Image (cartoon, rainbow, N blue to C red):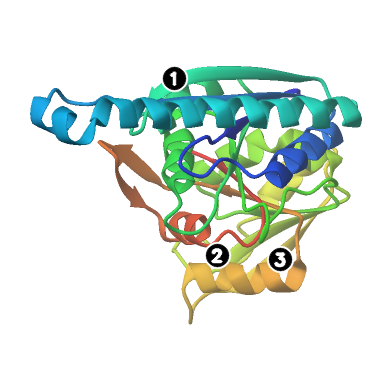
Amino acid sequence: MRDIMLHVDTYAEPTPPHAIRQAVAFAGALEAELTGFATHIDINVPDNWIAERLLHVNAMASAEESKSLAAARQSLEHLDTSARAAGVKAHSLVARASLHGIGPCVARHARTRDLCLVSVGDRMDSQRAVAEDVIFGSGRPVLVFHPDRAPLPATLARVAVTWDGSRSAARAAADAMPVLKRASDVRVVTVVGEKPSATAGVADDFIRHLLAHRVSAHVDEVDGRHRSIGASLDAYISQAKPHLVVMGAYGSSRLKEFVLGGATEHVLNKVLTPTLFSH
């Protein structure tokens, strides 16, 4: 992965500086170039002379747009300073997008990147919707992280790949191959019994495939018959403590309505470790 993009949020809560520094360190660990992509919001105010007369809504919208642009400039300056200090080649890009069009805008630009980084906050954070749009709309892998609870790693010693033999799992594993080749400890995780395809030994041929790419991996089979897939993954992450999780994203996106697979929804709602999604 030589070409990485970080979505820099500018409204209402800008991407925190330490999330930007983590992205710089992560790009440096992969010897990749990093593009900070900031979205400058565009607030379209409907014509209403009464609201304009009483509330001056156009002036209010203009002020909020200016705040967004100022946040974009400040964050990208911080990215440039951090990248120069770390010896990472970085670029900056700003694009205008409506409040409801940020995710699709980021997805379009992510299509010409090897990887898109999206920093998320709490469950109701707007970046959750951006992450969904990019996962299902870009056709490229997306790495979701929480800068405080699940920070981006500066080293990739242990990487866990979830595997159930599905198309999405295969896509995620292929997209993550450059990362797997850099990891010193690759774990292939199968939650056995969670679905009909997730049976004991389902990862054996995947291990053969990894060896063909000179990636040595170990299989961890987790009993998932008596708890949810989310609980099984949480327990595994708590025990194995991987620096990064790789998983296929299940679901679809249509008119901002998402039908997500149980594991996908659980991880996006509760990011415990940085997770690379592919769909």
Residue at image mark 2: 199
Residue at image mark 3: 220
Residue at image mark 1: 96
**Which residue is rendered at x = 54% and y = 36% of the image?**
9
Q: Secondary structure at mark 2?
A: loop
Compare residues 49 and 13 and report the one nearer the observer: 49
Mark earlier in primary sequence (3, 2): 2
Compare residues 263 and 42 and report the one nearer the observer: 42
Farthest bottom residue?
226
Q: Is residue 51 left or right of residue 204?
A: left
Q: Quadrant of residue 93?
A: top right
Given this view, does label 3 or label 2 mark the residue nearer the observer? 3
Q: Amino acid at mark 2?
A: Thr
Given this view, does label 3 or label 1 mark the residue nearer the observer? 1
CA–CA distance in space, label 3 to label 1:
45 Å
**Which residue is rendered at x = 46% and y = 73% of the image?**
228
CA–CA distance in space, label 3 to label 2:
12 Å
